[in-house]
Amino acid sequence: MNILVISGSPRKNGNTEIMVEAFVKGARASGNTVTVKKMSELTVAPCKDCEYCFSHDGICTQHDGMTEILAAVDRADMMVFASPIYWFNVSAQLKAVIDRLYARAKKGFNPTCAGLLLDSGSPNVYEGAIAAYKGMLHFLHWRDRGIVTISGMESKGLMSRSPDLQKVEDFGRSLH
Ligand SMILES: Cc1cc2nc3c(=O)[nH]c(=O)nc-3n(C[C@H](O)[C@H](O)[C@H](O)COP(=O)(O)O)c2cc1C
């Protein structure tokens, strides 16, 4: 399977990127092709709802990091959304990418399934992000392949010591 991971943290080498590395390790071990797009490296502006994409074969008027993300979406069978929790939801960086997926709303999507990886300081903060993810998948008729949440991430890099990283790697390995 061709898997596209969007790593939603703006923090380079932070907890989300460490979590994504574990996922990638497992997914590649099962023979999947995995592409990671990091929001610590790309800038994506919010959708402007100009609807140009609706009448121009999915072409977006904004030329930024989303150009290469959309090209990767078109090659992917599955999308994985990874994000730190920011105020009980995904990061604004990931939300901008999700909003800009509007460019495929009329043209149609290649992916047919998705996964969600979330990390946070506190436990029990995932309800909003998970509800939005599930609503989106229901709307798109995509299958949910799994959701992993890891809390206790009060500072940068704590993830590398988390025993829960194995769950993320196992999730990646379960996909084919
Ligand atoms: C703007 C902001 C908002 C946050 N909001 C929450 C929150 O609502 N609940 C929580 O448990 N952690 C919250 N956190 C903590 C992060 O989710 C946590 O430290 C995460 O592991 C950071 O991931 P990163 O290193 O990949 O950026 C917040 C952090 C930031 C910077």
Image (spheres, helix red, strand yellow):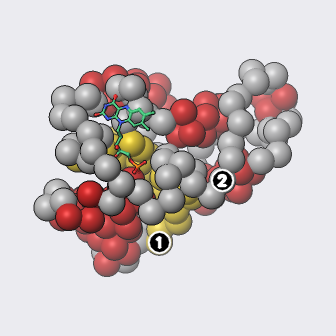
Image-quadrant location for residue 156: bottom left
Q: Nearer the viewer, mark 1 or mark 2?
A: 2
**Is 39 above or below relative to 141?**
below
Secondary structure, mark 2, is loop
Q: Residue at x 33, y 60 (%)?
A: 157
Question: How far from the left and from the top, in percent, is residue 5?
Answer: 48, 56
Foreground pick, 13 / 124: 13
The residue tagged 2 is 42
Quarter in which the C terminus is drawn: bottom left
The residue tagged 1 is 33
Question: How far from the left and from the top, in percent, is residue 165?
Answer: 22, 61
In primary-sequence order, the first of circles 1 and 2 is: 1
Foreground pick, 134 / 124: 124
In the rendered structure, which amino acid carries the disc numbered 2? Leu
Q: Residue at x 54, y 33 (%)?
A: 92
Along the horizontal axis of the image, is 96 left or right of 87?
Answer: right
Q: Is residue 141 visible?
A: no
Q: Residue furthest left?
A: 163
Q: Residue furthest front?
A: 155
Quarter in which the N terminus is drawn: bottom left
> Quick check: marks 1 and 2 in contact, CB under 8 Å?
no
Question: How far from the left and from the top, in percent, is residue 125?
Answer: 26, 28
Q: Quadrant of ligand 1?
A: top left
